Image (cartoon, grey):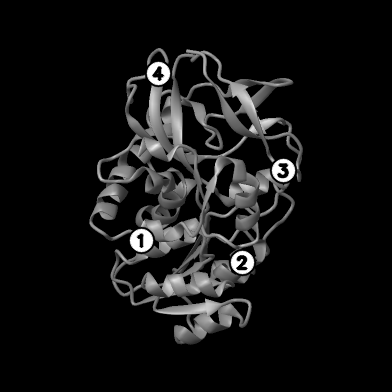
Amino acid sequence: MSVTFRAAVLHELNQPLSIETVEAPALAAGQVLVKLAYSGVCHSQVMEARGGRGPDRYLPHMLGHEGSGVVVEIGEGVAKVRPGDRVILGWIKGAGADAQGIRYKGRNGYINAGAVTTFNEYAVVAENRVTPLPPGVPMDVAALFGCALPVGAGIVINIAKPPPGSTLAVFGLGGIGLSALMACKLFSCKQLIAVDVEPAKLEMARELGATAVIDASRSNPVEEIRALTGGLGVDFAIESAGLTRVIEQAFDATRRFGGLCVFASHPKSDEKIALDPFELICGKRILGTWGGDSRPGHDIELLAGLYRDGKLPLASMFTRRYALTEINAALDDLEHRRSVRPLIEIDPTLG
């Protein structure tokens, strides 16, 4: 099936994405053709477009890694979904074929894409990057199930698993940080501290159940957290701000003798974190996570159930919605902290 459609294409780092007409290739084994309804926008795309990951040998290419849509066609061997199924698209590998990356035909040659892209009206994706959408989850909210929610909530549910009476701090209140904050409310925590530099996000965190909020632009968050915890630091610190100094702060705010700092953010490619090794031998731990250790086939069902029960008020993250033609404004707003999780409305008529 030949499909021609609009897509946002990155031709040069630090330049706006271009909305162009591209043509999808015929499906190979293990691939799925999806018509997109919505896409989220993650800091990872800002990093890609702004050169934060270093030289890009795949230019020109398409972007986006969380979205929702409807299956149009399936390739040979695909068994997880059928045409007409509503699905979540995400970057975390699930069950199914790990099919080859895609190349689309553009106006001046081929345009690269990986196993999934979502800043486009249609996408050819690998079977293991789509998950059937559970009932009761709207298509716009479903976009968050592709990255923000499984990563943020996954850190809490799959890794931290805070026991009753725990103290936690969340550094960075974007989509991942707020998802982690919501998941923390599922546990009987003694203290839940939210750290950011944007007053609106801190107020949102308070409304979502944070017991204390800290504006890191006005005070030292490590000192504030130690004061709130009797000088000890928190049992668990979760970092998603994407800055090396914030990873360091989250580690410093973690208590000795068993405290755990988990970070999911990706600072610029040439930056390093600096830690005091004595803190490590005093029993502090630090851990990076790939996607919140999530298993899409299992975790999405779990998270959908929590959403249906009213325990994950995810729609609050969408502070602004954009058309696909406004993708550069969405990236700018996310980069400059004017939006929590931009939502791209590609074809809202799909549900």
Q: Nearer the viewer, mark 3 or mark 1?
A: 3
Measure how far apart labels 2 and 3 are at the Cα level: 28 Å
- Of residue 252 and residue 200, the one placed in the foreground of this image is 200
Task: Categorize mark 4 by other alpha carbons within 10 Å: few (<14), some (14-19), many (20+).
Answer: many
Measure how far apart labels 1 and 4 are at the Cα level: 34 Å
Measure how far apart labels 2 and 1 are at the Cα level: 21 Å
The residue that mark 3 highlights is: 16
Relative image position of residue 239 (x, y in whole percent):
53, 62
Q: Which mark is residue 62?
A: none
Residue appearing at x 25%, y 50% in the figure? 305
Q: Nearer the viewer, mark 2 or mark 3?
A: 3
> Mark 3 or 1 closer to N-term?
3
Q: Are marks 4 and 2 in contact (CB under 8 Å)?
A: no
- Of residue 304 and residue 15, the one placed in the foreground of this image is 15
Q: Which mark is residue 246?
A: 2
Does residue 5 lie above or below 10 as drawn?
above
Residue type highlighted by circle 2: Val
Q: Which image quadrant for residue 59?
A: top right
Q: Are marks 1 and 4 in contact (CB under 8 Å)?
A: no
Q: Nearer the viewer, mark 1 or mark 4?
A: 4
The residue that mark 1 highlights is: 183
Residue type highlighted by circle 4: Ile
Q: SS for tag 2?
A: helix
Q: Which mark is residue 74?
A: 4
Task: Categorize mark 2 by other alpha carbons within 10 Å: few (<14), some (14-19), many (20+).
Answer: many
Relative image position of residue 184 (x, y in whole percent):
36, 65
